[in-house]
Image: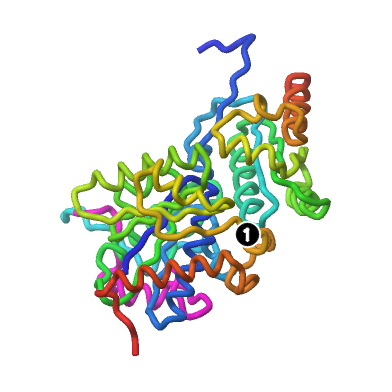
Amino acid sequence: MRVAFVGKGGAGKSAISGTFARLLARRGHPVLAIDSDPLPGMAYSLGLPHDDAPLPDEAIEDRPDDEEGPRYRLRAGLSPVEAVERYAATAPDGVRFLQFGKVRTDPRALFRSQFAFRQIIRELPVDRWDLVGDLPGGTRQPFTGWGGYADTFLIVVEPMAKSLLSARRLARLASSGDRPVRVVAVANKVTEAVDAEHISRRTGLEVVAAVPLDPVFAAAERAGKAPLDAAPDSAGVQAVSSLVDRLEKEHPRMKVTP
Amino acid sequence: MDFSGQVVVADLEAGVGTLTRLGDAGVDKVLIIVEPTPKSVEVGSRAAAIVADKSLGEVVVVASRVQSDDDLAMIRKAFPDHQVVPVPDDPAIVAADRDGQAPLDTAPDAPAVQALTALAGDLLATA
């Protein structure tokens, strides 16, 4: 399974994707959570302390002038799988967590790490980890190559006019690439029974989960805790669990560890 | 362009990407919208650092969706050197958003709208 959560800023991508990754891992799947947001987010929802650290310089080398390819790359001899095993953090439930680092003031400080990060994801063997990505809000990253690993885009949509508009644009962009991907919606902060249907009608997307507006789930966010730790029995966590059930059934190729 | 005598209000993209790419064109005020969550406070702190680093303008922190004194205290603690303006969590804003309407049209007297009206007045008086 290779999924990426996208949507407008504030739609709830990190909380849902972090919870999704851990629930998937609890069912025995090897999960790599991929955070390509230059700002902190997914780590909180996984239950990890946030950390700015980029991939270290020892993992990266400059491309020699007489060779073609990206400016920086993984050090010769370091495979993408080894890089994950060595440099990805380990979150609760055994989820591995990979990021290229977080920006403080100058994003150029992360260039080297970004090149290596993208190479790792591009070249990972498909059967090693299930990938769960949390892409930054908006449209810039998901469809400029950063979401290239995903076979399913989950657009997190709130039942609000602005969020619906963003979702329609994201859906168009997701479907306009040169490879087939599945694009579906996750309705978030749902308060009324008709919300999911409304989102489906307005976006033209299949709604694969409806996560209710849940004060307990929201309180976890306010406390900076993973919803799965702070509110394991909440309606929000239950809804994400149902989403895991559904995608698990729909991805027969997904590897399950013994 | 010459904007003298006019008010320009820019709504930047989420995150700090646009801030990091802005040149040295300063503004009078940079309003950083922060919710009372550690994640939002962390992002807001980084935005404030970039604004200071690039001398873009004076920072005003807008504490949005504040539900309690604790919420506000958490944000004030993170921004001890900045003015912090609370905007309460307000169902009228949520309802307007759901309907795709401007809160100022649908709920001009709602507490959050009132807080923003006061903020606009302050900015006009001091900018």
Instruction: Tell me if residue A95 comes above or below residue B46 in the rendering.
Output: below
State which quarter of the image contains the C terminus of chain A: bottom left
- Of A67 and B119, nearer the camera is B119
Q: Is residue A219 above or below residue A129?
A: above
Residue A255, image x and y in percent? 29, 79
The residue that appears at 76% across and 29% down in the rendered structure is B109
Residue A225 on image: x %, y %: 63, 67
Residue at 73 percent of width and 51 percent of height = B78
Q: Residue at x 24, y 44 (%)?
A: A176
The one of A73 and A250 positioned closer to us in this rendering: A250
In reply to whether residue A87 is colored magenta, the answer given is yes
Q: Is residue A56 visible?
A: no
For disc 1, the marked residue is: A214
- The amino acid type, in three-letter code, at marker 1 is Asp
Instruction: In the displayed orientation, state which residue is furthest to the bottom.
Output: A258
Of the 4 image quadrants, the one containing the N terminus of chain A is bottom left
From the top left corner, tell me how far across and down residue A6 is, in percent.
Answer: 42, 52
The stretch in magenta equals A69-97
Whether the magenta-drawn stretch holds residue B92 is answered as no
Give coordinates of residue A158: x percent, y percent.
Answer: 51, 48
